[in-house]
Amino acid sequence: MGRRRGLLCTARAAWLAAAVCTQLLLVLVSAQTCPPAQQCAFRVLAIGDSLTKGAVPSKQLNHPYSLRLQALLDRKFKNRATPSVTTAAYNYMGVFQKAQNDDGQVLDVTLVPLMQSQLDQAKQQGRGYQWVVVMAGVNDLGAGNYTAAAIMPKLAEAYKLATASGANVLAIPPFPNRFVSRSSKNEQQRLQLAVLMRNWVAAQPAAGDCGQPRVYLAEMPAFWFGFWSMPPERRAEMQDDLLHLTEKGYDLLAWQIFNAISPRVPLRGCLCPTAAGSSSSSRSGSSNRKGRL
């Protein structure tokens, strides 16, 4: 009797072990193949002025944050989706201020028409964007002397164009412009614009399901982007002149953008954002981190 019980226990243990191994194998195979996400393209539009273009004036070159952002998205998705980042940016462009080409020729290009043309082109190609990253307004404040109250409705118009196309928007308030003094009206209007952007985003409906894109706010952490108050050594690492960034600065900007987008993009399923509110890196405790996968 004891021998029979021992054989039964052994057989039962073997069966249970086989069942567990089978379930683990199914889980591993499912995690590796992940067929729904593999079929997805993940497209990001980076739109804005010379900061989006990645201007590094001292070296007379462009190092857009989209380069590092592309690399980070490639690492995140690996073989599960196909990310691509498109840059649409012009020097001196704003919501009112007209762009200039590299030769200094004034172009009839401002943010809203540029946004519309990029979205129309993507629609014609049958390849919409999942995210649009918008950085604009600093040229309107500085060169144009426009008020925050005048700029905000035009930014909102651009955001709404993107969300109407099915894309989520990451809105980034302008950085400090040290070409003007800290006590200037331009700087006060920049701070006011940040408040208006924060309030506008907070007033938008919360994301529901995959079919409801929305606008998220990403305020850059003062540790890396608070150029008025940071130590001179760190400022020299981050800022090339009184406004534009260094190559390292643009790479760190890419990390911040990645950190804002990445948590809202699951690796499986329909690649839609989670139902979350606006994101402020300076309040999330990530001000001193370059970013994590």
Image (spheres, rainbow, N blue to C red):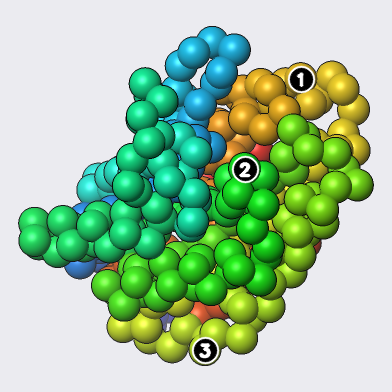
How crowded pointer 2 is (Cα within 10 Å; few <14, some 14-19, many 20+) is rated as: few
Inter-mark Cα distance, 1 to 2: 24 Å
How crowded pointer 1 is (Cα within 10 Å; few <14, some 14-19, many 20+) is rated as: some
Q: Is residue 225 visible?
A: no
Q: In this view, does 291 lie to the left or right of 119?
A: right
Residue in the picture at 46% in, 16% down: 61
Rendered view: 33 above or below 202? above
Residue 127 placement (x, y as % from top left) = 15, 59
> Which residue occupies the foreground of this view, 102 or 36?
102
Task: Give amino acid for label 3.
Answer: Pro
Question: Residue under circle 2?
Answer: 143
Inter-mark Cα distance, 2 to 3: 34 Å
Question: Residue under circle 1?
Answer: 236
Residue in the picture at 41% in, 41% down: 99
Residue 19 placement (x, y as % from top left) = 29, 71
How crowded pointer 3 is (Cα within 10 Å; few <14, some 14-19, many 20+) is rated as: few
Residue in the picture at 38% in, 62% down: 112
Secondary element type, mark 2: loop
Residue 204 placement (x, y as % from top left) = 55, 85
Q: Which quadrant is home to the N terminus?
A: bottom left
Secondary element type, mark 1: helix
Q: Can residue 64 be seen in this view?
A: yes
Residue 163 placement (x, y as % from top left) = 36, 74
> Which residue occupies the foreground of this view, 121 or 44?
121
Question: Residue under circle 3?
Answer: 205
In terms of sequence position, does the residue under pointer 1 or pointer 3 come before the other?
3
In terms of sequence position, does the residue under pointer 2 or pointer 3 come before the other?
2
Secondary element type, mark 3: loop
Q: In this view, does 150 lie to the left or right of 181?
A: left
Q: Quadrant of residue 120?
A: bottom left
Rendered view: 65 above or below 218? above
Residue in the picture at 90% in, 27% down: 231
